[in-house]
Image (cartoon, helix red, strand yellow):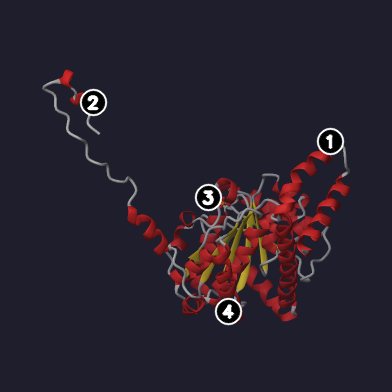
Amino acid sequence: MEHPENSVEYAGLQVNAGVEQPQSVNPYLRQMRKRRQVLFTVSEYVEGILRGDVTRLSQAVTLVESTLPEHQVVAQEVIEKCLPYSGNSVRVGISGVPGAGKSTSIDALGVHLLDRMGGKLAVLAIDPSSEKTKGSILGDKTRMEKLAVHPKSFIRPSPTAGSLGGVARKTRETIILCEAAGYNHVFVETVGVGQSETACHSMVDFFLLIQLAGTGDELQGIKRGIMEIADGIVINKADGDNVDRAELAASHFRNALHLFPLPESGLVPEVRCYSGFYELGIDEVLDMIGRYIDHVKETGFFQYRRNEQAKYWMYESINEQLRNGFYFNPRIRELIGPTEQQVLGGQVTSFVAAKRLVDEYYAEIKD
Ligand code: GDP
């Protein structure tokens, strides 16, 4: 269109027609993105993993973490193919409240472990809050400086999968891939908030609880039932003028542990003090884990616990699938809001409302 200022009253002024502006988005970007997302075949993933190719392993883990159904189909097949090559690691869960020194300790324990035993270490994480905070605070490479640059370590932050069950399942599947890739030591880091500890416990051979002295943690731990699932308790930051307090906390824990029935493993959890930061007592913590593993392998409890975990995860997966089937059903999605209102308005009881919805769901899926 002719520019308005080229009309006669602006005589002497000539405004040239503008040039068309280029697109602000690179037209090739979409194509590039598509190319980057390209999926490999199941056997390409599996061969890469079995070869110990870290890039291919990372790509497969990304696939496991993806929520896209087409990614999940491939991921599940890859996991199935890797399953016969998995199981050959010692899996250690490491838990503690934020600030307890988990990353510092994992860094120290990991490097000492690799120095002593050789092999390869995978550090994974379960952090149910990562969905909310959009960014995981666990399994962060920048917080494990030595392991992050260690050629024999693989660090992966927590998957973000919404529900705790989802996050935990993906971490468990990632363990299988890592083991198939030859990682014979696996650490699973989790934050000390109730249910995620239980989820972590259900996929490891040894559950290590990191505590601090003088924070009232002793009582907290006992109250929350966490003592029942700990296979070993360690008091971190036993350095400087904190050593005596750490020793005192340790003796409180030892006394408290006598109040509990003997765990299924037949071993009373050991309690030790150490300093992750100054790397004091690290080898003793590793010895404690080693002693436990040797014992349970000898008694058969090691395999028993893994079998129980496999069973647990079968039922967890059934529950998850049933729940998803129900809540994502279009008819149920339509009805659930109004039904909730009826319950809130006192028109129907919770039980009647639930039964109506479930009946409706079964009627739906029958057709
Ligand atoms: P996380 O949140 O449990 O992973 O804890 P971090 O490993 O990030 O540690 C929290 C803080 O405690 C950091 O400032 C560490 O430097 C410090 N810290 C960790 N371990 C020790 C230790 O053994 N002794 C001392 N004095 N400080 C420590």
| Number of the label disc, if any, that sits on residue 345 | 1
| Number of the label disc, if any, that sits on residue 81 | 4
Viewer-side label of 4, 3: 4
Q: Residues within 10 Å of mark 1 (few under 14, many from 20)?
A: few
Could you tell which of marks 2 and 3 lies nearer the N-terminus?
2
| Disc 2/disc 4 C-alpha distance (Å) | 70 Å
Viewer-side label of 2, 4: 2
Does residue 24 show up? yes
| Number of the label disc, if any, that sits on residue 135 | 3
Residue drawn at the location 48% of the way across and 67% of the way down: 59
| Pointer 2 residue | 4
Could you tell which of marks 2 and 4 lies nearer the N-terminus?
2
Could you tell which of marks 4 and 3 lies nearer the N-terminus?
4
Say above or below: 82 vs 153. below
Asked if marks 1 and 3 touch (Cβ < 8 Å), the reply is: no
Q: Identify which residue, 333 or 194, lies in the foreground.
A: 333
Residue drawn at the location 71% of the way across and 45% of the way down: 216
Asked if marks 4 and 1 touch (Cβ < 8 Å), the reply is: no
Does residue 269 show up? no
Q: Identify which residue, 83 or 95, lies in the foreground.
A: 83
Viewer-side label of 2, 1: 2
| Disc 4/disc 3 C-alpha distance (Å) | 31 Å
Asked if marks 4 and 3 touch (Cβ < 8 Å), the reply is: no
Q: Identify which residue, 210 or 270, lies in the foreground.
A: 210
Q: Where in the figure is residue 106, as x and y percent of width and height?
A: 55, 60
Q: Type of residue at label 3?
A: Gly
Q: As drawn, is 167 to the left or to the right of 33?
A: right
Image quarter where the C terminus lies is bottom right
